[in-house]
Amino acid sequence: MALQALQSSGVTFRKILSHFPEELSLAFVYGSGVYRQAGPSSDQKNAMLDFVFTVDDPVAWHSKNLKKNWRHYSFLKVLGPKIITSIQNNYGAGVYYNSLIMCDGRLIKYGVISTNILIEDLLNWNNLYIAGRLQKPVKIISMNEDVTLRAALDRNLKSAVTTAFLMLPESFSEEDLFIEIAGLSYSGDFRMVVGEDKTKVLNIVKPNIAHFRELYGSILQENPQVVYKSQQGRLEIDKSPEGQFTQLMTLPKSLQQQIHHIMDSPGKNRDVEETLFQVAHDPDCGDVVRLGMKKSVIYSSLKLHKMWKGWLRKTS
């Protein structure tokens, strides 16, 4: 099966990257400007390119970027790199976005996030914004040898697989799995109810099954709890209480805590492990996990939307 990535050369992305300071621990581009999406409104050729830059020292990076790309910033540029970094780290999803930028003849937006904040999100799903992006196919342009970051990226993918397993039946298709994974970061996102196409997840997955398989294939092959029939595109997983308890115990902390809050009766004061043990034996285990995902995303979704509205007003 031919991969459905756009034919945009990697040189295009690297040329755009050359306009920014080099001190990046990770740089990637994502969305319909890179991978084909289904739907009548999809226009890959003219789609805005969405970049994320991960930096170890945001103050130093913004200081250099302000000198190179002063016009990219809103009025906050007059407050300097320390204030910009403070806003980046303490509001929204820990990301500072500059949007509607023309660069090398392409319309782009780019987000800047601290390496430490990204690692925490990848491991614990604190807001699942950038971590959610990285659960779907992205084009990595630059990445350093940070062992901790690489391990966190891998853990994020494994957590996505485990969460999807808990919400799926005993037997399912690759497409079922990838739809669940792609939808994780949209769980509870009000934009999927108001304003955005409700078929967005399907439009992301269907043209890009091969890319999802490339991203998750080795994890599925190595997982002892799944029988992965790659030739048939089918999977079977362990749905026993013991198997589900093992899966629940490896979920990111924020999701475990949400499940605990949902299931812990007033006055019982059980610890998280006891609650997860109960959920593992519950016939509605998958529904509980789904509700936990929804609650995990709702707060960060609303908070990020408020921040985005502010940025769009400033750049319009």
Image: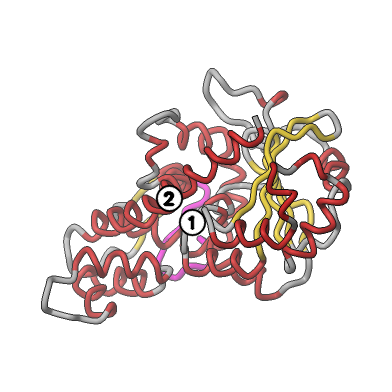
In the picture, the quarter occupied by the C terminus is: top right
Residue 2 seen in this snapshot: no
Q: Is residue 239 left or right of residue 141?
A: left
Q: Name the amino acid type tagged 2.
A: Leu
Residue under the image location 59 percent in, 35 percent down: 312
Q: Position of residue 133 (x, y in %)?
A: 56, 50
Q: Position of residue 235 (x, y in %)?
A: 41, 53
Number of numbered discs on residues: 2
Q: Looking at the image, is 302 positioned above or below residue 264? A: above
How far apart are labels 1 and 2 at the CA level? 9 Å
Residue under the image location 65 percent in, 46 percent down: 97
- For residue 128, the mark is 1
Q: How is the image coloured?
A: secondary structure
In the picture, the quarter occupied by the N terminus is: top right
Magenta residues, as a range? Answer: 220-234
Find disc 2 in the rendering and name its residue. 184
**Disc 1 + disc 2, Cβ < 8 Å:** yes
Q: Looking at the image, is 276 positioned above or below residue 210? A: below
Residue 227 seen in this snapshot: yes
Residue under the image location 27 percent in, 56 percent down: 286
Q: Name the amino acid type tagged 1.
A: Leu
Mark nearest the camera among 1 and 2 is 1
- For residue 302, the mark is none
Of labels 1 and 2, earlier in sequence is: 1
Q: Is residue 266 left or right of residue 294?
A: left
Within the magenta stretch, is there residue 41?
A: no
